Image: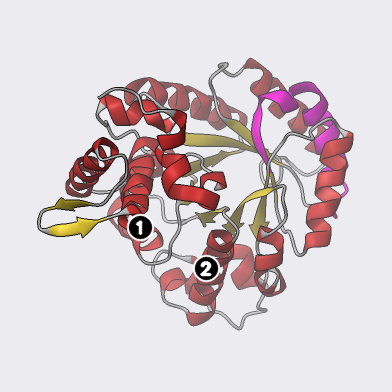
Amino acid sequence: MTALPAELHPNKVLLGAQAGMVRMPVCDHYSGVEVRMRKSLQLQAELTEEMGTCVFDVTLDCEDGAPVGGELEHALLVSELVATAAPEARVAVRVHPVDHPSFHADVMAIVPSVGHRLAHIMVPKTESVADVDAAVQAINQAGGQHLPVHVLIESPFAVHQAFDIAAHPRVASLSFGVMDFVSAHGGAIPAQAMGVAGQFEHPLVVRAKLAIASACHAHGKVPSHCVVPELNDLAAFSRAAQVAANDMGYTRMWSIHPSQIRPILEAMSPSQADIDTAVAIIQAAMQAHWAPIRHAGQLHDRASYRYFWQLLQRAHATGKPLPTDLSDQMGS
């Protein structure tokens, strides 16, 4: 199929305002110990080569990764790792919260030297738009005006502010911090709600997850699902990732162990049958210059084309192979 002229590109014809939606890999892999940070960057390079696209971000953790009293040294180590990462690597950093004594030191140790290499900065324990403004001001003053900001929602008050936070122009993604959220209730939510079963059952936790996902979709941002702490039960983890993707509207998820990356990719990717259907419909629609078509006895027009094009974008982001004529359109 010959290349479509710019005015007929699916992002222009189908998505409209949604063409500006933030897109990023579906997995965000966290590590904070030096040996694990180095291994994470190596694994990212290996999977990028295997799948033909970068399928997960590596976020180097200053908040939980730094030993108490060694925060500055850890931030300098993170800066060194970012500087020596492969040019095509997608690397991010989680700094300390804006009200932590080490927040400004983290930003100044990392952004001026390697901010141009970062995919984003994660700001934890964000409670309000004022916190986002404070973080953005510090990042800008360090020379990071271009950097997207991801925020971590970890309290009942922050969940209440989620729609306003998601509306902030520098915010690209909201993540849910289930463990801090449960702890913030002073024992009113049982500890089981942090785990793989309870966090999908307790009404307050489920309500918070849905509110964050809804806030992100309302403002074209990426909802990123929280950690699942069980590391040995991959079957349970896979089910959790599928529920997050299919039932809760999350398009990205945290990994805290290398074994969790591939289950996230699989859960966040459409099935091969759905991909095949989407390919057939979009190719026929492109041939028709987006006029209505009939496929398998059903009428399709731009409303359904939009859905199937976005499905193919998700497939591409998870490393699923697509026909050349469609994969070539993904980066344009």
Q: Nearer the viewer, residue 43 or 113?
A: 113
User: What segment is highlighted magenta in the picture?
Assistant: 99-121
Q: Nearer the viewer, residue 187 or 279?
A: 279
In the image, residue 322 lies in the stretch drawn in magenta = no
Q: Quadrant of residue 149?
A: top right
Q: Main secondary structure of the magenta part?
A: helix
Gap between marks 1 and 2, in whole Å? 27 Å
Q: Earlier in the sequence, mark 1 or mark 2?
A: 2
**Residue 104 location (% of width, % of height):** 87, 41
Disc number for residue 303: 1
**Residue 238 location (% of width, % of height):** 32, 54
Residue under numbered circle 2: 209
What's the residue type where badge 1 is placed?
A: Ala
Determine whether, in the image, residue 171 is placed left or right of residue 212: right
Which residue appears at 55% of the width and 16% of the height? Answer: 86
What's the residue type where badge 2 is placed?
A: Lys
**Residue 128 location (% of width, % of height):** 77, 64
